[in-house]
Image (spheres, grey):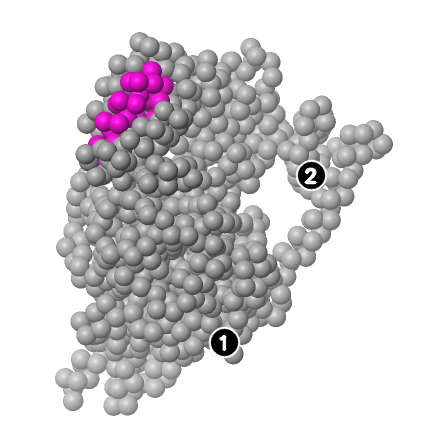
């Protein structure tokens, strides 16, 4: 989306420009104020104005020169960089297939970029060899050093590069970054750490790394959405990470919600019992997340039926919505009866969720919807049932509605 | 005579100090905005975005497209919307009593069929005539309703919307493929975000391929070219700066992303203004503060929306007149926020800024220049001072425009040819040699027309994004008004 070079120089040029504007404007304001109380004459005002015009014109020339030069130089720079990068990709591919030798010494930035691109594209042993090349040539150490301290934009560049490299030795650096007081760095580090965690294959190392990341994420008080992203980005390591997040002593509510949503999203059935435990959580958001996860997992032990049935009449609308979705896991007659009842709920969204859930119950659910369309005393229930049929099985509507 | 001279001098001093403060504020916001762009551009890599897209962690979005007599651009716009890169979304087009061929174009291009539909009537609107869905694009819904204005059409779309995020967009606009994806990231990053504004860039002169501007060229008329600079300045510098300050008051009506529940909670768009976008944002701030709910409204430079800008001076003047009337209506409606510490930075800084510099700006500008002319004519002011001040004001405007042009140059999709670049440069210089002043006079007039022209939109002449023959047509040129 953006060119990531030349922007800081531009900001520096702009700082000079602002100074060239601000100082004469300050003088001008002072002179005018003096003039109002009779302390300054017209000639002095004209001189100051002339100075302000001169310095602003100089600022404009400076800025314009920079912008036009940047346009010209960046076009050429990108063409040359593109060619160099393509050449490096070709060379690295030759190195990988053994028809060329790896370069010696520190790598140029475009060589590192080419390796990072290959690391993202290749899979299996080739990808591992790319990782080895990145480490062997010191690129990883350099990136880790840059990611650890310095200016925010340079750190971000390094963290994004490490996120693409996904090399396990960088994991501690990234986890340290999660604790950074600068939230931009903290969030970027958490995502990069999750992507790196996904590539740690040794199960023992993975569990240890998951525990470290879980500690860091919870301590950094990252928002719910970011924790959920971290869980998803951890891919195969998500199970280990979720376990680490949930077994922590008093984890934050948003962390628990994100972990539970991750369970549902990634269909981690191994946590099904754990999710059921959260159906009775005192926090309404956690309960909602647990109901969502139950719905996605498709698992509801008999002992938890009562909780879902109670949730169908909860005071909070969104609890009833998620409960309606989860009600498909109740024994069929019970599900049909309770969902039928919810079709007359005071909230349109609950009615809609109940109707959609009835559709998922197959012929029995469709038949129930048909009965509702024809004979339910509540007009809103009839309408929503008909709408659900139209949306999901339009061919049946005519037969049911008549 | 001496009294007049004293009055004129006092007003000149006020006008010049006002100008100095405004210039410095603009520069400060431009600087902060630039920093925002620098940091935002590095926060999410493309690979991460792809992974997250595959991981399906994004909230589904309803794209709301109000349309009134948009037969020339509606098909191309809707095509760009239905082809967005996003895991789950729907597009709801509302024809707000269109009297041209808008509905016919939509029916033909997207194979629409009428279907009965029930929806939550969370916000009252003018009656809906029919709801249609597309046989070609399952996520496309078209609503035909009686005319009630843009806000009413948006409210109707909100009622029908099924997803937690809503994206009101203009029907003469196109969205960048990743626009929704990048905007919705802000809701993930911070639970308290209730609205996100994106960048709007002029579309005129570009070539459209598959609903996306591909070959970006400068438009042919100077009216359009000058707006390229105006938009860059407003979005890359102004709004980015306000976001850093935590006091953003406008999310452009051309493209924004809102939490549906937050909008419904405050009653949707207000139909009593022609500046419904700003009004909603002010009301969202206000109601959330009143209820003690944590909230943030942010601008993100990454999500880009392309819009067709007026190509003739008459339409442009009417548009700016409307915007300025809308601004005054909104400021007056929410006058209790002015200097009210309850609203924090918003009440103590942003709202006063909008009163003093955005609302009254054109009045002070026009009267200030008028008084300079009168002073010079009566010999109260030295002519040299007059000309020097005029030069200074113009140069300051040019500097800001050049900063905006510089930020635009950092975009990967920029005006790339040398000729276009030179034209952009010339436009940034030319903007303050007449164009800005004409619009200042229009806004000056609008400041006194709020009551007389209440709710009046004025005729907007459009050349149209394209005249595509079918949704599968690929290469389309955006016509210029020559």
Q: Quote the CA–CA distance across marks 1 and 2.
A: 45 Å
Q: Residue at x 26, y 14 (%)?
A: A306
Q: Residue at x 26, y 86 (%)?
A: B374
Residue B370 on the magenta segment: no
Q: Quadrant of residue A356?
A: top left
Q: Which residues are magenta?
A: A324-351
Q: Residue at x 55, y 41 (%)?
A: B46
Label 1 and label 2 in one chain: no
How many numbered tags mark residues here? 2
Disc 2 packing (10 Å; few <14; some 14–19; many ≥20): many
Return the mark for residue A114.
Answer: 2
Disc 1 packing (10 Å; few <14; some 14–19; many ≥20): some
Most foreground residue, B248 or A310: A310
SS type, badge 2: helix
Q: Is residue B123 above or below residue A98?
A: below
**Residue B18 appears left or right of B467:** left
Q: Is residue A275 above or below residue B64?
A: above
Chain for numbered disc 1: B
């Amino acid at each position: 989306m953006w060119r990531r070079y030349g922007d800081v120089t531009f900001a520096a040029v702009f700082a000079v420009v602002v100074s060239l504007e601000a100082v004469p404007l300050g003088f001008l304001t002072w002179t005018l104020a003096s003039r109002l109380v009779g302390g300054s004459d017209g000639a002095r005002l004209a001189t100051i104005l002339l100075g302000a015009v001169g310095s602003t014109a100089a600022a404009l020339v400076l800025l314009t020169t920079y912008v036009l030069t940047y346009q010209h130089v960046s076009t050429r720079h990108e063409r040359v960089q593109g060619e160099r990068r393509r050449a490096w990709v070709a060379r690295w591919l030759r190195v990988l297939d053994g028809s060329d030798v790896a370069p010696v010494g520190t790598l140029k930035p475009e060589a590192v970029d080419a390796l990072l691109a290959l690391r993202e594209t290749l899979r299996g042993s080739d990808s591992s060899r790319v990782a080895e090349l990145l480490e062997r040539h010191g690129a990883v150490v350099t990136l880790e050093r840059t990611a650890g301290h310095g200016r925010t934009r340079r750190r971000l560049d390094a963290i994004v590069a490490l996120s693409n490299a996904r090399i396990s030795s960088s994991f501690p650096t990234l986890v340290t970054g999660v604790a950074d007081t600068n939230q931009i760095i903290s969030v970027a580090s958490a995502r990069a750490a999750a992507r790196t965690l996904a590539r740690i294959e040794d199960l023992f190392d993975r569990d240890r790394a998951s525990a470290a990341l879980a500690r860091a994420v919870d301590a950094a008080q990252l928002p719910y959405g970011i924790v959920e992203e971290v869980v998803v980005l951890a891919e195969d390591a998500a199970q280990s990470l979720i376990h680490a997040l949930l077994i922590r002593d008093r984890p934050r509510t948003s962390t628990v919600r994100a972990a539970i949503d991750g369970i549902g999203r990634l269909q981690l059935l191994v946590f099904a019992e754990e999710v059921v435990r959260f159906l009775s959580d005192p926090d309404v958001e956690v309960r909602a997340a647990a109901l969502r996860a139950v719905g996605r997992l498709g698992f509801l032990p008999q002992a938890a039926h009562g909780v879902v049935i109670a949730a169908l009449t909860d005071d909070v609308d969104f609890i009833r919505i998620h409960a309606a979705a989860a009600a498909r896991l109740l024994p069929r007659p019970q599900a049909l009866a309770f969902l039928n009842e919810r079709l007359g709920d005071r909230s349109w969204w609950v009615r809609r969720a109940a109707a959609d859930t009835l559709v998922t119950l197959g012929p029995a659910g469709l038949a129930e919807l048909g009965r509702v369309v024809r004979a339910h005393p509540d007009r809103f229930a009839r309408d929503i049932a008909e709408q659900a049929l139209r949306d999901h099985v339009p061919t049946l509507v005519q037969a049911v509605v008549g | 005579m001496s009294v007049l001279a004293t009055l004129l001098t006092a007003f000149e001093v006020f006008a010049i100090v006002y100008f100095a403060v405004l210039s410095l504020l603009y520069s400060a916001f431009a600087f902060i905005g630039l920093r925002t762009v620098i940091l935002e551009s590095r926060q999410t890599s493309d690979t991460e975005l792809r992974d997250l897209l595959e991981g399906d962690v994004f909230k589904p979005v309803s794209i709301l497209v109000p349309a009134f007599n948009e037969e020339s651009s509606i098909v191309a716009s809707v095509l760009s919307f239905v082809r967005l890169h996003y895991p789950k979304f729907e597009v709801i087009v509302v024809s707000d009593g269109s009297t041209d061929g808008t509905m016919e174009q939509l029916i033909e291009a997207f194979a629409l069929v009428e279907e009965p539909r029930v929806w939550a009537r969370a916000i009252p609107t003018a009656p809906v005539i029919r709801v249609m869905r597309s046989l070609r694009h399952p996520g496309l819904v078209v609503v035909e309703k009686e005319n009630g204005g843009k806000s009413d059409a948006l409210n109707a779309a909100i009622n029908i919307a099924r997803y937690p995020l809503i994206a009101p967009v203009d029907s003469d606009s196109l969205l960048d493929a990743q626009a929704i994806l990048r905007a919705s990231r802000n809701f993930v990053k911070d639970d308290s975000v209730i609205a996100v504004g994106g960048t709007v860039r002029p579309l005129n002169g570009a070539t459209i391929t598959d609903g996306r501007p591909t070959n970006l060229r400068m438009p042919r008329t100077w009216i359009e070219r000058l707006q390229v600079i105006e938009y860059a300045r407003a979005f890359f510098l102004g709004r980015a700066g306000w976001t850093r300050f935590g006091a953003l008051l406008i999310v452009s009506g051309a493209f924004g992303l809102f939490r549906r529940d937050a909008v419904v909670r405050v009653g949707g768009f207000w139909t009593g203004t022609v500046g419904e976008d700003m009004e909603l944002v002010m009301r969202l701030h206000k109601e959330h503060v009143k209820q003690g709910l944590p909230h943030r409204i942010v601008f993100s430079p990454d999500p880009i929306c392309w819009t067709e800008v007026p190509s003739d001076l008459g339409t442009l003047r009417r548009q700016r007149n409307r915007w300025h009337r809308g601004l005054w209506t909104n400021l007056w409606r929410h006058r209790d926020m002015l200097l009210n510490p309850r609203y924090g930075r918003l009440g103590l800084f942003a709202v006063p800024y909008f009163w003093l510099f955005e609302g009254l700006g054109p009045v002070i500008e026009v009267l200030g220049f008028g008084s300079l002319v009168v002073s010079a004519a009566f010999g109260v002011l030295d002519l040299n001072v007059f000309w020097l001040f005029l030069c200074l004001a113009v140069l300051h405007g040019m500097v800001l425009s050049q900063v905006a042009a510089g930020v635009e140059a950092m975009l990967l999709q920029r005006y790339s040819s040398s000729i276009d670049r030179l034209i952009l440069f010339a436009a940034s210089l030319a903007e303050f040699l007449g164009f800005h002043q004409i619009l200042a006079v229009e806004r000056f007039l609008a400041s006194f027309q709020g009551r007389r022209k209440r709710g009046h939109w004025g005729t907007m002449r459009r050349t149209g994004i394209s005249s595509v023959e079918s949704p599968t047509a690929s290469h389309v040129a955006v016509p210029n008004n020559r």
